[in-house]
Amino acid sequence: MRITVVEGDITEQDVSAIVNAANSSLMGGGGVDGAIHRAAGPGLLEHCRALRATRWPEGLPPGRAASTPGARLPADWVIHTVGPNRHADETDPSVLVSCFRESLLEAVRLGADSVAFPAIGAGVYGWAADDVARAARRALTEEPTHWAGLVEVRFVLFSAPVAAAFREHLSDLCA
Ligand code: ADP
């Protein structure tokens, strides 16, 4: 499995699945969530409503992941996960690790061969980029045998400082 770190826009990635840093409602929001819904078109919201109507009537809890088709995105799938919100006193980094782990497991379950991640939690939920990069690293290295079907895990960071933090913490894992 190849691990890569790039600076860019996750909505433009030509991968099997992209991960969305969603909120529990799954009804869209700001930041990367808003960008993904804008790029995917209204079909994505319909898929999210279906998740709420079936598997997650109360919303998706922090640390969990659920997938929908990608609607108009280049990616086939969107894996929605909810980061812990530091501003709501959700300060346990293991929940952040769980976001990465559960999303990777969902990608494997979908049969995705490539998956792109944003810096989950590093925006309005208030986590430092270093903490997010460390969480990603922990998820990737804890149970590496689980990711057997994945050919590429790509971290797509929206700014140079966040990309630098990911490079620092993941460079020895990168191809
Ligand atoms: P959270 O609520 O989990 O903190 P945000 O969407 O506010 O999520 O921010 C998560 C990260 O996603 C931030 O580093 C933000 O700069 C980044 N981001 C915003 N738009 C995009 C995009 N189009 N592609 C990749 N990353 C993005």
Image (cartoon, rainbow, N blue to C red):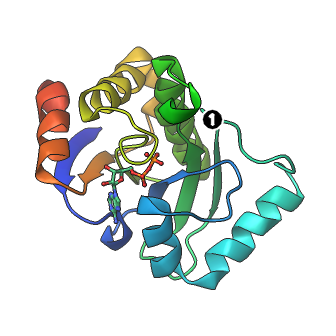
Nearer to the camera, 124 or 27: 124
Q: Quadrant of residue 148?
A: top left
Total count of labels: 1
> Which residue carries the number 1 mark?
62
The residue located at (33%, 46%) in the rendering is: 151
Say above or below: 16 vs 21.
below
Give the image location of residue 81, x and y in percent: 57, 45
Q: Position of residue 84 (x, y in %)?
A: 54, 33
Residue 51 vs 89, above or below: the answer is below
State whether residue 72 is above or below residue 112: below
Q: Indicate yes or no: mark 1 CB to ligand 1 under 8 Å.
A: no
- 105 left or right of 165? right
Q: How far from the left and from the top, in percent, is residue 155?
A: 28, 47
Residue 55 in sight in this render: yes
| Rendered residue at 61%/44% (across/down) | 109
Helix, strand, or loop for circle 1?
loop
Residue at the (30%, 38%) spot, across then down: 1
85 with respect to 119 (left or right): right
Q: Position of residue 18 (x, y in %)?
A: 44, 58
Circle 1: is it few (<14), some (14-19), or many (20+) Cα within 10 Å?
some
- Residue placed at 51% from the left, 34% from the top? 87
Q: Is residue 49 left or right of residue 167?
A: right
The quarter of the rendered structure image containing the C terminus is top left
The answer to whether residue 111 is visible is no
- In the displayed structure image, the side of residue 145 where residue 168 appears, left or right: left
Q: Amino acid at mark 1?
A: Pro
Q: Which one is nearer the viewer's eye here, 118 or 130?
A: 130
- Which corner quadrant of the figure contains ligand 1? bottom left
